[in-house]
Amino acid sequence: MKHKSIGLLLALLMACSLCVAEAAPIILDGSSSGRQYDGIGALSAGASSRLLIDYPEPQRSEVLDFLFKPHFGAALQICKVEIGGDVNSTDGSEQSHMHTATDENYHRGYEWWLMREAKKRNPNIKLWALEWGAPAWINPTGRNVWTDNNITYTLNFLKHARSDYGLTIDYVGGWNEHGYDVNWIEKLRSALDTNGFAGTKIVCDDSFKWSIGPNLQSDAAFFKSVDIIGNHYVNTSKKNLSDPNWQAVLATGKPIWQSEMGSSGYITGGAGLARQVNWGYIDDRVTGNTNWSTIWSVFKGFPFDGDGLMLASEPWSGHYLVGSSIWAFAHTTQFADIGWKYLDKSCGFFDDDSSHGSYVTLKSPTSGDYSLTIETIGAPAHTALFTVTQGLSSQTLHVWRTNFHSVKPTDWFVRLPDIRPVDHSFTVSLEPDCIYSLTTTSGQTKGASPSPSPATSSFPLPYHESFTGYTPGATPRYLSDIEGSFEIAQALGGRKGHCLRQCAVGSPVFWSPRGNPLTVVGDPLWENYAVSSDVLLEGPGSVDLVGRASGDGAMGGFAGYHLRIADTGAWSLIAAHGSKEAVLASGTASISTMTWHTLGLQFDDDRISASIDGKTVVDKLEDAAYDSGMAGYQVNAWQPAQFMNLSIVPRGKPLPDLKATATASSFQPGYEPGKAVDGETTTMWHTMWSPTAAQLPQYITLDLRGTYGLTRLKYVPRQDGEPNGTITQYNIYVSMDGVSFGAPIASGSWDKSSTIKKVLLRGAKARYVRLEGVQGVGGFCSASEVSVAGTRAP
């Protein structure tokens, strides 16, 4: 009994000590030292904003308000853009303002427009410009941008931003994610100072390491040239405390920015962004953050599908979506202005443990106003006690919260009851997976559009584009350049008026090599259609009309069919995936340069026809490599070529998806197999992950409730911006009774993108169809939708 009493007493003492520890207040100290807050922004680069400029009003203005309008949505404080270089920079190519040393046009592309729209909404927003690649003339013999030509190129961008648009570029950098050249940075600094841009600051080096620190310390001229140290996807971890390079960066006293972060879904990325902003300052003294991308305004199926602060990928319908990522940033941008100060003594992790959540405090430089941002991503529920001291206002605190665990917009950026400190102290009850903002300021709002976003719809057919009615240098609506620069120009070859022309000349300085100039338009789900266009070769080489183009987009190279003609008279029908090409048919025709020719491709299920100048050269050739995709043009060298009268018309009606019920070998509660056949891409089936993960392979079985001759299976990966469960290796089985399935009738591999996948089933007769995931991202299987098309069997 004596030992039990002592044990009970010790337990009570330990419990009391824990209560005292939990009750110990966190001091919000207004006299604390700390770095200046430099703002939160977003990055339009890699063609991630391509389709936004084509949006109709009022939806386009509504989207821009959510991004840039103060006290409305994300309220971005920095707008960073790509200086276009005619090269693929992730999801496409952005146009150069100087294709050659003598060619200048400062009205190409959409980044000028985006900066101007941002500035209209927030005159105090900071503008930032950076290169990913450059035209060939920048460095004709080398493969980098560290040349005097590029100093001229960069200066011209800044000059015409000011003269043509009234925009002052506040920050400029070197070459995205390719390190730095000390001599070039010093030359750029000198050129900026002598050309009226002494106020433009240089950010260096927009890469992934802290190696710049020792160089700044050892080179006085370099130190003087660099104003801000920028790093990408900063590893917010105390590991940096033992990194001598990071210590050298910190010792410079220069601002440290996360000059690119995010690359996460507009709905699912919010929690990570909230944590990164807080942790970045606590661990690494990061005072500025820039998300890639500003918005996801790209055709479906491209790399990093959905990565942005919101979604706007359907200019033909006007449909857009606001995700949680908008509000993750609003919890800081609507509560602190650039120039506020972090209070180091009032920033940290609860219980000095990052898994318990974090808090940062920012103070106004002109008053006692302050804002406290708390994140609890992955943390347990708890109550925090704060005490306000040293000149901070003890006025009522306005409280806002976003619950990232919820996908309901009504749970994002919600105003909670005010908190009134008592004796300069207050408590906050904190729920898991949330971000809270507490402030003595006012004016915060959750912006909303006056009317709902239009319904989503597929890209409509027929589609006709004559390329007339545009000004020279313009990009036609919806066309998206993957590589090179396709823009409006004066037609040659005896034709009057305007045409589309590939204008990038000579192999450029790549950010990351992709291939030949290519532009696409349409929907990756287009199946049976006819595409035709007039084309003209300006010089030796070849040009392609492209159909059923899709795949994992720009990063892996487009897959599809190409009808290619060359100035030698040779033609070929090719099944291509990036640089890998298989010739399906070939021959010769009367083809020459500076002469217009009409090319045509026709797709009817697995039969392909092709024509040149009205003559059929391929008639119903059977090939099942690609059964759907977009249309476009390719030029097979970095040279000019011209195009007119693009026409895409549907052929017949695709078979509708058969109604089905579904069962599965495994599912997580809330993610049942029926959600893969409910016609909603916002729901999904997912194999079990808790309390234990189901091991692969796993399967989902569709009951068609009748016997059918099957034509194809369609797999729609999850569409919420996260990859887990996306099936990357599969088998397909069929059965008449749902018990005996036999050997697979189809097997293969898919990339891990969210683009829709299809498999031709060639008339297999069955009632039950089983999709088995042999491999999947994260070791799981998931599906937003699985469907089968076919005709009733006798």
Image (spheres, rainbow, N blue to C red):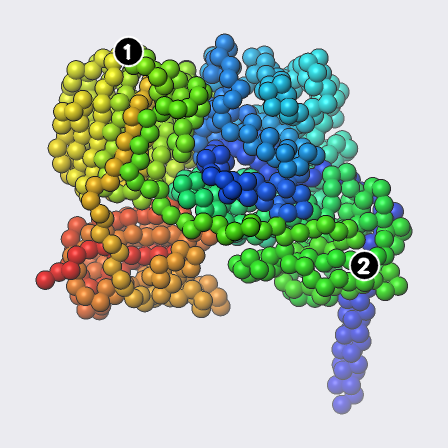
Report how far apart the C-alphas of labels 2 and 1 lie in the structure: 75 Å
* Any part of residue 740 in sight: no
**Closer-to-camera residue (267/319):** 319
Give the residue at x 36% y 23%. Answer: 468
Q: Of callouts 2 and 1, which one flags the residue occurring earlier in the amino acid sequence?
A: 2
Q: Position of residue 106 (x, y in %)?
A: 53, 19
**Closer-to-camera residue (145/80):** 80
Give the residue at x 40% y 34%. Answer: 478
Looking at the rendering, which quadrant does residue 401 occupy? bottom right
- Which image quarter is the N terminus in? bottom right
Disc 2, SS: loop
Q: Which mark's residue is nearer the viewer, 2 or 1?
A: 1
**Closer-to-camera residue (28/454):** 454
Could you tell me the amino acid type at mark 1?
Answer: Gly
On screen, residue 535 above or below 242: above
Looking at the rendering, which quadrant does residue 404 occupy? bottom right
Could you tell me the amino acid type at mark 2?
Answer: Thr
The label number, if any, that marks residue 494 in the structure image: 1
Task: Name the residue tied to disc 2.
Answer: 396
Position of residue 621 in the picture relative to residue 338 (left or right): left
